Image (tube, grey):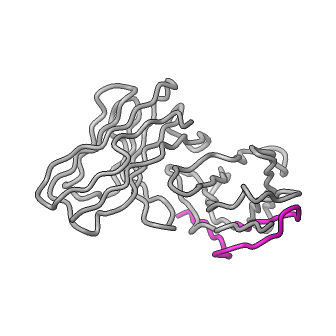
Amino acid sequence: DTEVTQTPKHLVMGMTNKKSLKCEQHMGHRAMYWYKQKAKKPPELMFVYSYEKLSINESVPSRFSPECPNSSLLNLHLHALQPEDSALYLCASSPRAGPNQPQHFGDGTRLSIL
Amino acid sequence: AQSVAQPEDQVNVAEGNPLTVKCTYSVSGNPYLFWYVQYPNRGLQFLLKYITGDNLVKGSYGFEAEFNKSQTSFHLKKPSALVSDSALYFCAADGNKLVFGAGTILRVKS
């Protein structure tokens, strides 16, 4: 069982909808991440939160809006998405942000944009 | 800028045989290197990491990786492959963010 829980597992939405992806971890990790992954491709980093503050935004379009309400939760708010945004969205956490920290991944939310 | 290369899209091996999944890297400074595995419809799972020290790193599920500074390689190995090892494997380097290789599909046939 994964220690990083993502909900929902699947999401289908229209281009005008607003939805949110949720991620939760109870390992006491203080760094959390959002990645986008296309089929059989490596994950692409979107956002990094360190101690609940946004530390990295990889030039992600504003239709993706991250939020870290507390040290255990990470949300990704979606609005006016495009068909090319269909992908697997992975959340990850690590004890701290930094180069020697293994990341723990959730199983992702598979997002389909109609 | 750091980069990671996995030169093989797919590796096929018979069950019980040794396996190697190749990775080369290009980083400035000391490399922090990782291997992750992804099973179908799952997230990535951490296998092992190299920070410093011994060039042979042991990890989960019987996997190990050999760090070679002169060849800038970090190949993943296992002495005896299992069918259940079939998955997508990612090598990654970490500077200020994790950079992944393109991935290698490992197929182990019984």
Residue A60, picture quadrant: bottom left
Residue drawn at (57%, 36%), measured in percent from left and top? A1
Q: Is residue B35 left or right of residue A113?
A: right
Where residue B61 appears, as percent x and y from the top left, is 76, 46
The residue sitting at the left extreme is A16
- Which of B12 and B100 lies nearest the eye of the viewer? B12
Q: Is residue A46 magenta?
A: no
Residue drawn at (37%, 55%), measured in percent from left and top? A110
What's the magenta region? B1-23
- Which of A49 and B104 lies nearest the eye of the viewer? B104
Residue drawn at (59%, 55%), measured in percent from left and top? B39
Where residue B12 appears, as percent x and y from the top left, is 75, 73
Where residue A104 appears, as percent x and y from the top left, is 54, 40
Q: Is residue A11 left or right of residue B17?
A: left
Residue drawn at (55%, 51%), measured in percent from left and top? B95
Residue B93, picture quadrant: bottom right
Compared with B83, A101 (above or below) is: above
Q: Is residue B8 magenta?
A: yes
- Which of A37 and B66 lies nearest the eye of the viewer? A37
Q: Quadrant of the C terminus of chain A?
A: bottom left
Q: Is residue A100 left or right of residue A73?
A: right
Where residue B72 appears, as percent x and y from the top left, is 74, 65
